[in-house]
Image: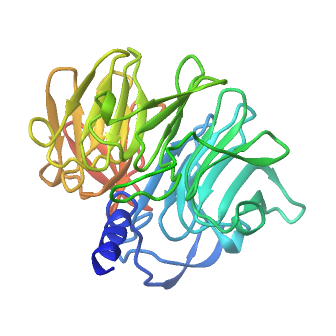
Amino acid sequence: MFYLLLSVLSLFAACKEQEDTTRQKLTITGSPTTLRIHPDQQIANYIRHIFQDKNGNFWFGTNGYGVAHYDGKAISYYSIAEGFDGHQITGISEDPDQNIWFATDLGIVKYDWTTTKEGKKKFTNYTSQQYFGNQRFWSLLADSKGVIWAGAETGIFRFDGVMWLPFPLPLPKKVTGEFITGGTTWSITEDRIGNLWFSTNGFGAYKYDGSKFTQYSEKDGLTNNNVDVILEDRQENVWFGTRFGGVSRFDGKTYTNFTQRDSIGNNEVCEIYEDTSGNIWMSSEGYGVYRFDGSRFTNFGEDQGLGVRAVQTIFEDKEGRLWVGGGGGLYRLEGDSFINVKKDGPWE
């Protein structure tokens, strides 16, 4: 039982790491609230997700006090006190109507840019207790048709604008192995022709074409069945970042695997991202990030100014600037090194 407990704890200690609970009072632009803020005024001790909406606003999902919003002038925080039902933000997506959706530890939240008569931001909370049976969420996607997909602890939910309904994957009935946690889906993505891809924590990945599922797993050549993230690149290769096996690239026929034996420092890969130049960026637990230009890997870690060893999120903004977040705050690439962006910047 002791070793089982250690296994479960380690599952959530790295890619899904929790934040400390030290609290202090301070006033933030937007409203006074009680937050957990690092003494050096980081935007958050832990940045889980970075997103820029179609209007250019930044949204930073935190690991303890909701979402931080930067409108080009100041940072505002939204959590329980502001009507936003969630402390931990694990996914952010924008639908075709420019509504912003958030996956949280307390359910799903929708922000639709309107305000109430009192001038407050308007959030619609789909609480876990009411809709999902008291589950936290780990992934979120607003697809090109406006359908909202959300991955919870025990499976996927689909919102068609009216109802949230379970969307079961055809998982095996008998399962053995370490870190199997039901239908937990860490990543949901849509490829260029509209197929949906779902990662699983022990069953590889599934592609859904609107009528049938195709499974991708170790028996096909995938490096590990515990998949954390899925990305389709501009050349239509599909990349899988895994918990224990590094990275697999699938070209539609064969897999090419990149692991700590030949390419990266650690086989735990939580995030993969393609920039506008076609470089593939990936996290590697304890080693910051790696950039793959198609032929070689370049590491960016502490020596290059990146103070985040456990990277959770990588994002390129509309100006072509690359951002990284995780345990240690928010960082932006400037030339060949990273700078720490705190509440007071530097933003430009």
Q: How is the image coloured?
A: rainbow
Q: Is residue 315 visible?
A: no
Occupied quadrant, residue 21 = bottom left
The residue at 39%/23% (across/down) is 276
Is 311 situated above or below 256? below
Q: In front: 326, or 331?
A: 326
> Residue 12: percent from the left, percent from the top?
38, 65
Q: In front: 106, or 174?
A: 174
> Residue 149: percent from the left, percent from the top?
65, 42
Quadrant of the rendering where the N terminus is positioned: bottom left
> Residue 174: percent from the left, percent from the top?
46, 51
Q: In front: 127, or 43?
A: 127
Is 56 situated above or below 60? above
> Residue 157: percent from the left, percent from the top?
67, 48
Is 169 positioned to the left or the right of 16 in the image?
right
Judged from this view, the residue extending furthest toward the front is 174
Is 307 positioned to the left or the right of 112 in the image?
left
Tag count: 0
The residue at 75%/59% (across/down) is 126
Is 203 positioned to the left or the right of 32 in the image?
left
Quadrant of the rendering where the C terminus is positioned: top left
Occupied quadrant, residue 314 = top left
Q: Is residue 348 visible?
A: yes
Is 167 positioned to the left or the right of 43 in the image?
right
Is 33 situated above or below 280? below
The residue at 24%/57% (across/down) is 309
Judged from this view, the residue extending furthest toward the right is 117
The residue at 33%/40% (across/down) is 241
